[in-house]
Amino acid sequence: MNILLVEDNPTQSKLTSTILQRRGFEVDSAETLEQALKKLARPTFDAILLDLSLPDSDGINTFSRVHAITDIPVVVLSAQDDRDLALQAVRQGAQDYLIKGMLSTDSLIRCLQYSVERNRVENELRRGQERLRIIMDNSYDAFLSMNSDWEITGWNVQAQQTFGWTDKEAIGQSLDLIFPTHLKKQSLRSIEQQFLNNSNWNARTTRELLAIHKDGHDFPVEIGFFRIDAEPKPSYCAFLRDITKRIEYQEELEHLVQERTKSLTQKNEELRQFAKIASHDLQEPLKAVQGFVNLLEETANGNFDKDQKEFLGFIQDGTMRMQQLIKSVLIHSQIGNNSSENYTTDCNLVVEEVMADLAVSIKDTNTQFEVDWLPDINVEHSQMLQLFENLASNAIKYRSAKAPLIHFSAEESGDMWLFSVRDNGIGIDPEYKEKIFDMFSRLHGKTKYPGTGMGLAICKRIVTSHGGNIWVESKSGEGCIFLFTLPAIIAKTNAGAEK
Ligand code: ADP
């Protein structure tokens, strides 16, 4: 350990340095304050033994001058047994106040060792506090600490910027300074209550409240409160953030979303109306064409030659196909228009109806059905019928050489039902498993498999308009499983209804 011994009395200096050197200390001496300050310019010492009465300085001033330029621990070694002076020195940061000649060698050594250690801990603590202060002053959030009576005890730089009050103005004030009184009482009560109910030593809670600025305007803040349970009373800390911009942004966003939704709903409705009117209007000339073709057939009374008959057949096929297309477009455009919450449809009955509707083709193709128990669902009956019927008729239409086997089932999946309609038909190449749900999308020519390419698009529209999803799992030649989800009916119990 390196000691700087500041002592103007040569005998005393010799005595002390010999004692210390014998115990393995390195000792450097200074006889005046000026000499001492010069030596301290090179901070190679672990401790300073300082006599307060020097030729060029006397009393507490000697200590103050030394302490001002170094954080090396200082032990005062004085000839005067002066209690007041000793207290003054210790209050200002001296590690100890020793009186010459009243001290054993061991006590002096121990005192020096303890001083060095104590000083190291104090310096660490100081550095920690300084770091904390820097962090707090650079925080983007305002920080304030409060005592158990909610009086402000700490106030960082951001708090000053957020609320307009300096730390000097704020510290010691009640929270009224930044919260309108009525609100403060209400919210503090609820915060206190929450803390009371929470036995965690560092209970936390967050709130959005209205705060007031020094200039009188109020603004929304988000506050994170926490309690520090220290004896004898707890204290509170809070980080606050001005959320004016965030709230303005949220309101703007909400407004924008509302506007967009309104305009989209309007556009959707316009499109729906357009599709409805267009389909109706298209049907008129089509019916006229069909009517005149029939009239032509009747008037010709079988006098058409082979070619003419064939051409007439093409016209009839074309108009029929056009009629189917228009009908499908109309159905597609009308889905998603009505809220289905008021409907409860028993899917088991729907499947029975599908079998009745498809009775002829079922009989012709020897189709077998396997139907597991199916749930009730909040979807309009006609839409469920359309959905199941499109899938079932496709299963029959796209059959393989085997007699069709169609399996209906459903299982619960969270708050949805997962339905599946499985067949043993020709299957679908995985490459097309998404495309087939597009409007007018067909994988085969109309001669082999008649159709409009609208069936699955209608299925998709029914499912997605109820918040579900539809997809297919299949490999070419291995049949298909069409899977779709629909929301489960939420049981309306008394408790639920009260909520
Ligand atoms: P459409 O049957 O009128 O052509 P869909 O929209 O119902 O129209 O089906 C689209 C296409 O998906 C069909 O053309 C067919 O290629 C394929 N597809 C649909 N269902 C099946 C199925 N069960 N098995 C094999 N292919 C199917």
Image: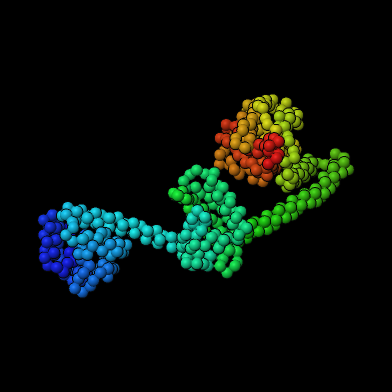
The percent position of residue 427, horizontal first and vertical second, equals 59, 34
The reply to whether residue 451 is in sight is no
Q: Residue at (63%, 26%) from the top-left corner?
A: 402
Q: Position of residue 249 (x, y in %)?
A: 59, 60
Residue plotted at (21% across, 62% down): 77
Q: With 67 as the anchor, is 175 left or right in this view?
A: right
Q: In this rendering, is residue 378 above or below 252?
A: above
Instruction: Name the residue nearer the viewer: 149 or 298.
Output: 149
Identify which residue, 112 or 108, lies in the foreground. Answer: 108
Give coordinates of residue 253: x percent, y percent: 62, 58
The scheme the figure's colours follow is rainbow
The quadrant of the picture occupied by the C terminus is: top right
Identified at 58% across, 41% down, the residue is: 432
Left or right of residue 464, residue 34 in this image: left
Residue at point 34%, 59% (across, down): 126
Relative depth, front residue between 326 and 121 = 121
Q: What residue occupies the far bottom of the structure in this picture?
A: 56
Determine the image quadrant of residue 94.
bottom left
